[in-house]
Amino acid sequence: MHSPSKIALLSLTGLLLSGVAVLPTALGSFAEGQPLTTSSIAPPTKMPVVTKESITFGAYDPHGDLGASPDSKIEHLFLPWEDVDLGTLALADDYAQARGRTLLISVEPWTWSTGSRQTSQELLHSILNGSRDANMAAVCSTAAKLKSPVIVRWGQEMDETDSQFSWSHWQGDDYAKAYRRMVEVCKVHLKTAKYMWSPKGNEGLQAFYPGNDVVDLIGLSVFGLEQYDRDKTGRDQTFAEHLAPGYARVAAYGKPIMVAELGYEGGDSFVRNWAESVTKRYPQFPALSAVIYFNDREVYPWPDGYGRPDWRVVRESIN
């Protein structure tokens, strides 16, 4: 995570994303305030294959690897609602507008400065008692000035209890109340956005559903790590196999479904299979409308010693 002192520096070149990197702009791509040089030494098969028959493809792309790609139609941003310069959203908007892309804004209800965070219950109470209305209003009133179409994704992966997110330890009813309140605050300022409820896809996610009136889209997270699959199941697993359980749990809500976070890593054959299959249309997933690639290294370590997989479609070299 970036320290607050670096937030001010990095916001000059783009919107902070995921606490790791920044949105590439006409000024260039930077990480930790230093220029990046990228080289395509990863297998070219890792890039998702997009055809005219494909569902919509987009990416969280802090390094700008897909900056010139006409295939990417959604630009994904991660945004804390504290300790961030919201004025940098205008840079993100310019970047997306120039490429004809929709902005998907994942609003994370905390600060990326780990030493300044509230406890899980403190955060919940501050949201439910209205103390955080101003945070959401500030984000949404700023987003209302943008020219690009906007999707707001608030408090993602609330059904995952790996301790990455403060809001992932709330009871279902409490999360639903918090989500509803934040979306209702946002709608006062941002009239045209669509709102995404985005569980990871785990068993029991239904307890967190906030209601059809505050959900326009549903997001899921799908990641394929070859070694993890082999260790846990004894074989490689496909994109469709990973997607199926979460999809089945949300399909009954009747909303368009997106894979809001997608990544895969492994040997050439494994990667090629995923690259060729993630944007296909599947008869068993009729509501699946888009996949959005997470084009960066994993932010939070996987369990059981698998570390932080590198999902990026190219490897970076820093001079």
Image (cartoon, rainbow, N blue to C red):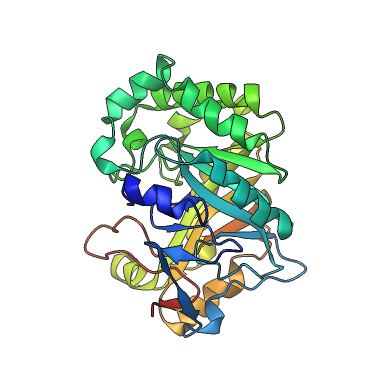
**Residue located at (53% from left, 72% from top):** 274
**Residue 168, x across and y down, in percent:** 35, 37
Q: Name the residue at 63% across, 41% down.
A: 151
Asked if residue 7 shows in the view, the reply is yes
Tell me: 32 left or right of 273. left
Residue 113 on image: x %, y %? 31, 43
How many marks the image carries: the answer is 0
Q: Say which of 308 and 228 sits in front.
A: 308
Relative horizontal placement of residue 263, taking residue 147 as reference (left or right): left
In the rendered image, residue 248, in percent from the top left (x then y), is placed at 54, 46
Q: What residue is drawn where x is 45% and y is 73%? A: 36
The residue at the point 56 percent across, 52 percent down is 76
Quadrant in which the C terminus appears: bottom left
Seen from the viewer's position, the closer of residues 23 and 271 is: 23
User: What x and y, as percent, mark residue 86?
Assistant: 52, 39
Above or below, comparing residue 55 to residue 169 in the picture: below
Residue at far right of view? 52
Would you identify the image quadrant in which residue 292 lies?
bottom right
Q: Residue furthest top?
A: 129
Work out whether residue 245 can be spotted. no
Q: Is residue 293 left or right of residue 288?
A: left
**Residue 304: which quarter of the image?**
bottom left
